[in-house]
Each structure stands twice: as C-alpha cells, then as structure tokens.
Image (spheres, rainbow, N blue to C red):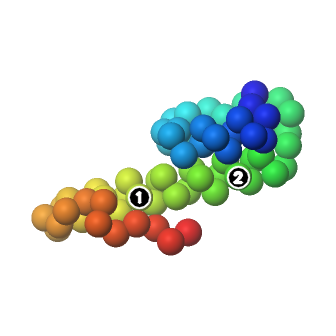
Amino acid sequence: MYSWRELNSKISEMSEQELLGLMDAELEGAKRTTVLVRLHQRYTMVRCTRERDDMLRKLGTTPGVEHCSA
C-alpha cells in the first residue's frame, strides 16, 4: 500500500499489470476512493497508449507518435 505521495512519485513508471494489481489490492484493502480513481485514470492512459500503438503498428505507422489525451 502506498501513501498518496509515494503513489504519485511512482505511478508514471507502473505497467498495466502493476496498476491492475494495485487497483485490486485497493478494492480488497483500504478502499480509498481517491487512490482507486487515480490508479484507474493512469491505467486507462497506459492501456490506451498500448492499444493505439498496436493499431498503428498494424498500419505500418510508427507507434508512440500519437498518445491519448485522456
């Protein structure tokens, strides 16, 4: 479990799987609404970027050029 400060300092480096794990742990443990919302916001951005990169790769376009604005 992370404090708010720890979470904000590490969240940008977390993978989809790490974020999912933390969301599950938050739902089972502390149930902090603000932490869960923040984890979900970051998770959707990471997932969106991966999905877009996958689509662009299929088109033969360089992935990572466009990112989610979410």
- Tell whether 5 sits left or right of 64: right
The residue at the point 34 percent across, 69 percent down is 66
Residue 15 vertical placement versus 52 (above, below): above
Q: Which residue is mark 1?
A: 49
Q: Can you give x and y, in whole percent of width and height, for residue 52 in the image? A: 35, 63
The residue at the point 30 percent across, 60 percent down is 64
Of residues 12 and 26, which is closer to you in this image? 12
Q: Amino acid at mark 1?
A: Thr
Q: Can you give x and y, in whole percent of width and height, for residue 42 in the image? A: 59, 53
The residue at the point 55 percent across, 34 percent down is 18
- Tell whether 18 sits left or right of 29: left
Q: Which residue is mark 2?
A: 38
- Tell whether 9 sits left or right of 5: left
Residue 25 vertical placement versus 13 (above, below): above
- Tell whether 49 sits left or right of 61: right
**Is there any visible trace of residue 24 in the rendered image?**
no
- Picture quadrant where residue 60 is located: bottom left
